[in-house]
Amino acid sequence: LYFSTVLRYFSLEENIKAYESGIKVKREYFRLKPIKSANGTSTLQPVPLGSNVKIGEKILCRLTLDCRNEYHYVVIEDPRPAGWESVEQLSDDNMYGDYSPDGWIPWTKYEFRDEKTAIFATRLPEGKWVAEYFMRAEVPGQFHSLPALAYAMYVPQLNGNGSEQRINIK
């Protein structure tokens, strides 16, 4: 007979700090500003968000993982702040802006759920990895963005979470 349990609980504390146990997680929000080059072409440049966002504004969410070793079956869960919706893009293979030094992309699936975005990797080698997706501000107010979590599905003690952030939608 084999069994396993996982205990999850909710805390009322404010300003949750980052934690690492094998996987370091960092979440950043960016605005995309059009920049014109000398030859007249326009590209989008990520600019740090700050704390104020306008309703309808499209924001880039960048999740950076720093793994101490190679891990298998890793999940990133990024809780969506109230007032935001994920923007699914279905146009090309590199739709989420993922990259690695050698061009290999570890992410096998993105799931846009009601309360979070879940990103899956079958194999995540040692080093830094980036996953990106877009969100849109929908409802005005001041919101907490709970920490993004990353963990190995079958070895949950390999985990980490980013820090809490606050965002004001006007």
Image (cartoon, rainbow, N blue to C red):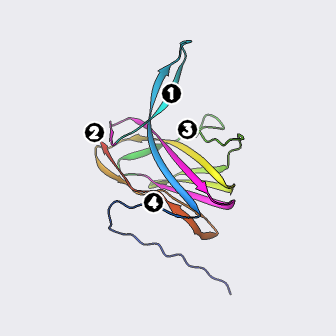
Q: Is residue 93 above or below residue 73?
A: above
Mark nearer the viewer, 4 or 1: 4
Horizontal side of residue 69 vs 36, given as left or right: right
Q: Of marks 3 and 1, which one's residue comes earlier in the chain?
A: 1
Q: How many residues crowd around disc 1 within 10 Å: few (fewer than 14), some, or many (20 or more)?
A: few
Looking at the rendering, the stretch of residues picked out in magenta corresponds to 51-80
CA separation in Å, label 4 and label 1: 30 Å
Task: Decide which of tag 4 and tag 2 comes sooner along the chain.
Answer: 4
Residue 140 x %, y %: 28, 43
Q: Position of residue 76 (x, y in %)?
A: 55, 56
Taking the image as shown, residue 101 lies to the left or right of residue 79, namely right
Q: Which residue is mark 3?
A: 89
| Front one among 98 and 70 | 70
Q: CA distance from mark 3 to mark 1?
A: 16 Å
Image point 67% across, 49% down: which residue? 106
Identify the secondary structure beneath mark 1: strand
Check disc 4 and report its element: helix, strand or loop.
loop
Q: Which mark is residue 44?
A: 1
Q: Badge 2, how many Cα within 10 Å: few under 14, some, many 20+?
A: some
In the image, residue 61 above or below residue 122: above
Q: Nearer the viewer, mark 1 or mark 2?
A: 1
Three-letter code for the amino acid on which mark 4 is drawn: Ala
Q: Which residue is mark 4?
A: 18
C-alpha span from label 1 to label 2: 23 Å
* Disc ID at residue 170: 2
Q: Amino acid at mark 3?
A: Gln
Q: Quadrant of the N terminus?
A: bottom right
Report crowding for label 3: few under 14, some 14 to 19, many 20 or more residues within 10 A (C-alpha).
Answer: few
Type of residue at label 1? Answer: Leu
Is label 2 in a helix, a strand or a loop? loop
